[in-house]
Image: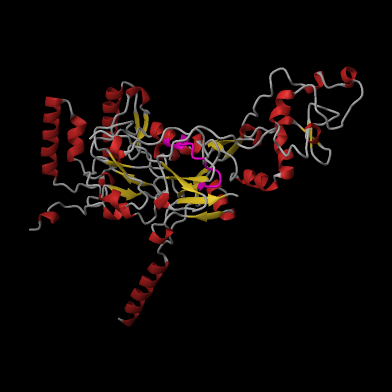
Amino acid sequence: MNPMNSSNNSGGCGSEAVDPGRRDVLKFLAVGAAMASGAACDLEGFFRKSFRELSPADVRRMVTGWERKYSRKYGKTVTVSETGPMAGVKFGYGLDLSRCVGCRRCVYACVEENNQSRKEPQIQWIRVLEMDKVHGIDLNHSDIYYDAAEVPRPGKFYMPIQCQQCDDPPCVKTCPVGATWKEKDGIVVIDYDWCIGCRCCMSACPYGARHFNWAEPSLPAEEMNPKTHVLGNRPRPKGVVEKCTFCIQRTREGMYPACVEICPVGARKFGNLLDPESEIRQAMDTKRVFVLKEELATHPSFFYFYAT
Amino acid sequence: MAAALVMTLSGAGAQGAHTPPPQVVKFQKQEKLVEAKAPPLTEGIFPCTQCHNEKVNGKLNTARRELQFHDDIQSEFHHDSENRWCLDCHDAKNRDVLHLTSGAAVTFTESYKLCGQCHGDKYRDWKRGVHGKRIGHWSGEKTYFLCVNCHNPHSPKFKPIKPLPPPTRPSEMKR
């Protein structure tokens, strides 16, 4: 008999795909080990199903575990939200290249909001490219390491790049374990506990938007943002990939992403692409808009535009 | 038998017709626009009429000239300064308000109406949320900034700013 058919259910979302008996054994082992080492949620995380197969109750239980663990580790009350996508919402992002001055305020606002590793390894989800006005957008001759007393520098323009939340994401296609996927509201997310750290997605991404935790992330407890989301800014372990999630912990609560809030020149627009009145749709309807590397047919949800 | 077959077929057809169309859920937004607080005027300067009144100054002189006062503003004034001066925006008869080219008075809190006279394209984009900045909630209460929250009306062009540090090069990171 095919062991795949031995359980008496259809194997759908949230159902018991593992043989109930085996599951009990795993639970027993987990509990036993937990009593021995006090690392209950780590072991349970190790034996759990992939995120999308978990029942809401399972997710809630895991989330509670993480909240306890993080609160203890960082010495403050950490919340882990599991808020799902809103119905009728598809997120879109607009960036006005005629306004951006390359000040990198967005880069550091993002680091602080999303609990990225500060140094060794230093991880930044937003890269700001400096390019020559006479050459136009030429990624091969762009510079992300520019350092200047003042920006914008004469003859230069700036192009921030972060995850483009593609509708046909190459990173999702290439992931061998299904640890990254596109949510209904358009956000491409990563299950940090399912990621095996193979970095296939990083080489597949044509935007360099994915970053790898080569070492245990350095996140000072006093700088840790305690408002987190399961699929977003909760602290990551060593050896997993991470990237921009349009600030999933903010935007699913209706707020603007941190980079939009900080931008001193108002170059960043965010909203619901399905709402014709939203700022992003207004920009797309009235301005000259393009997507980065259109020829690759990744269909980004991130739109660059020129307001003037 | 044939009737049964027809019944079955029509049943199947009817079932096909009842397949629900792809559901389009309209997002219910509770959007609320809140005006940002205008930046404060220089302390002690308002109301302007405490100095600008005929009892203090005598006859009203509206000729363009170098003033003995407001030298801080005069020195930084870069807003088509070749062609314009104070009284093109500030109302000569009532210094506590501004005025449009039509002569209609505009309060300091509604100065965007004045800006929009010349910068019509920006005014239009700003009302749509394309120009300028909004903070708060994309789907709920959001605060929009006024022209003067970001631009100094006497010198509206943004000044260059110091960028935050560049990222560490991979070669500089520990192995």
Residue B48 vs residue A229: left or right? right
Residue A106 drawn in magenta: yes
Q: Nearer the viewer, residue A308 or B171?
A: B171
Q: Is residue A254 visible?
A: no
In the image, residue A5 above or below residue A47: below
Residue A215 percent coordinates (x, y): 24, 34
- Please name the predominant secondary structure of the magenta segment in the image: loop
Q: Nearer the viewer, residue B38 or A211?
A: A211
Asked whether, in this view, residue A205 is left or right of residue A89, the answer is left
Q: Percent position (x, y) of residue B11?
A: 37, 71
Q: Residue at x 10, y 58 (%)?
A: A2
Is residue A166 a member of the stretch shown in magenta? no
Residue A11 vs residue B100: left or right? Answer: left
Quarter of the figure with the N terminus of chain A: bottom left
Give the color scheme: rainbow, by chain, secondary structure or one colour: secondary structure
Q: Residue furthest bottom?
A: B2
Q: Is residue B47 visible?
A: yes
Mark count: 0
Q: Nearer the viewer, residue A256 or A125?
A: A125
> Looking at the image, which residue sits at the far right?
B59
Picture residue at 30% right of the left edge, 33% below the top: A235
> Residue A232, position in %: x, y?
35, 39
Could you say which quadrant of the image residue A168 lies in?
Answer: bottom left
Tell me where residue A233 sits by quadrant.
Answer: top left
Front residue of A101 and B46: A101
Residue range of the region highlighted in magenta in the rendering: A95-107
